Image (cartoon, grey):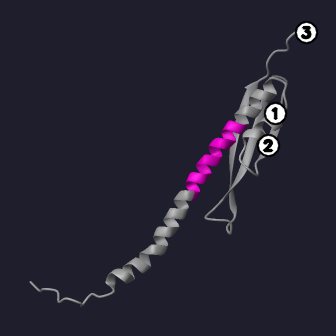
Amino acid sequence: MRRRQPGRDRGAFTAEFAAGLPALILLLLAGLTAVAAVTAKGQCVDAAREGALAGARGEAASAAALRVAPPGAQVDVAGGAETVTVVVRAPVRLLGSHLPAITVEGRAVAAREPEVAG
């Protein structure tokens, strides 16, 4: 069995650390982007639900959705005779602001409430 002589592997840890650090940082940024995307998706679903319920009651659906939606969100409202559909889309930046954004979407449908006779 050969014994390693002291001092023969100087700098090996530094070289391995320097090679692995960019991959670790990239993995961390990808994880943070995924968390931001999931959070924005949840906010879009909540905003769409809030807008659909407001629209079903006869209130302004887009205003209700924008109160809850993440910054930069776009709200689309479509109403039929019996239902209100609200779609909320929001951009999420990938790994900072220099790359293109992905878009997350939340959608909700609510039945219109019957008219109350005055």
Q: Is residue 88 left or right of residue 80?
A: left
Q: Considering depth in this image, is 96 or 83 the residue closer to the camera? A: 96
Q: Of label 3 and label 2, which has the lower sequence position?
A: 2
Residue shown at 72% from the left, 43% from the top? 69
Say which residue appears at 73% left-offset and 47% top-offset.
Answer: 89
> Which circle's residue, 3 or 1, is located before the other in the chain?
1
How far apart marks 3 and 1 lie (CA) works out to: 23 Å
- Determine whether 100 is above or below 108 in the image: below
| In the rendered image, the vertical position of residue 11 relative to residue 98, given as above or below | below
Disc on res. 61: 1
Q: Dot 2 corresponds to which residue?
A: 75
Tell me residue 90's x, y (percent).
72, 50
Q: Which residues are magenta?
A: 33-47
Pointer 3 residue: 118
Task: Kindly report which numbered mark, 3 or 2, lies closer to the viewer in this rendering.
Answer: 3
- Residue 71 can be seen in this image: yes
Residue 63 is drawn in which quadrant? top right
- Name the residue type under label 2: Val
Are dots 3 and 2 in contact, CB under 8 Å?
A: no
Magenta stretch holds residue 110: no
Q: Amino acid at mark 3?
A: Gly
